[in-house]
Amino acid sequence: MGEFELYLASASPRRRELLAQIGMRYQLLNVSISEIRLDDETAENYVRRVARDKARAGRQLLARDDSRPVLGADTVVMVDDSVLGKPRDRAEALSMLQQLSGREHQVLSSVALIDSEERLALNRTQVSFRKLGRVECERYWDTGECRDKAGAYAIQGYAAAFVRELRGSYSGVMGLPLYETAQLLQQAGIGLFGNRNEWSQDE
Ligand SMILES: Cc1cn([C@H]2C[C@H](O)[C@@H](COP(=O)(O)OP(=O)(O)OP(=O)(O)O)O2)c(=O)[nH]c1=O
């Protein structure tokens, strides 16, 4: 089957790291799709659609007889009725952090795995932040960590110090929910630890 099991249609270093964490060998595909939420689209449908579009765009790059699945993922932060993606600039990042300060928000992370079939999973995780001071948020921006992160924070970085409580999936907040990902991979016949079709046979 060659030296890798699947393709990862993502430029996110976090997703690479997470997929490698569960022993998957993958090849990267470079895709670019527009990430704009439609007016009447729920956050859930939006993250599902974007993950699916990333995987579909990856699939398009492959030879027809390549049966290895393509994985795409997407992550947003939801607070009240707002859906927070990546901040465009400092002002937007600071306003996102103020919105998240002293309360609970939800992180939605979707995974799409496409071969001859399309498989989708969605993880929803509740994250509670302590109150954040304005100067503290400005200093946090200065670390450079807010950029390229949904909701302008990275739980795997300095922002771990903001998290009072998390209910759900830490890997989901980081960008790729590994429990759901492993389930989709199993459905596609890819076992953990690099073994095809050998996973969970003793269940
Ligand atoms: C909330 C949160 C998000 N993130 C990251 C995960 C994602 O990379 C990013 C959300 O942006 P996405 O648009 O989901 O992904 P991306 O553009 O970084 O990568 P891809 O090429 O796969 O489209 O935010 C963290 O790293 N830590 C966190 O705590």
Image (tube, grey):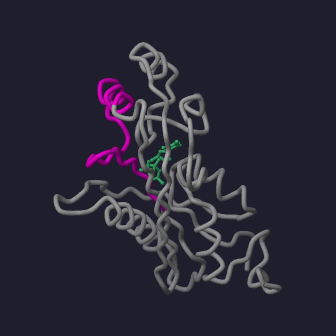
Quadrant holding the C terminus: bottom right
Q: Give the percent coordinates (x, y) of residue 179.
A: 63, 65
Position of residue 87 relative to residue 166, above or below, is above
Q: Residue at x 32, y 58 (%)?
A: 43
Quadrant housing residue 108: bottom left
> In the picture provided, is 59 more to the left or to the right than 36?
right
Quadrant holding the N terminus: bottom right
Q: Give the percent coordinates (x, y) of residue 58.
A: 46, 67
Q: Residue at x 46, y 31 (%)?
A: 146
Report the front residue among 44 and 14: 44
Q: Residue at x 36, y 48 (%)?
A: 78
Q: Give the percent coordinates (x, y) of residue 73.
A: 48, 60
> In the picture provided, is 168 more to the left or to the right than 105?
right
Position of residue 195 relative to residue 13, above or below, is below
Number of marks in the image?
A: 0
Q: Residue at x 65, y 64 (%)?
A: 26
Residue 149 within the magenta-colored segment of the rendering: no
Q: Give the percent coordinates (x, y) of residue 77.
A: 40, 47
Q: Which residues are magenta?
A: 73-98
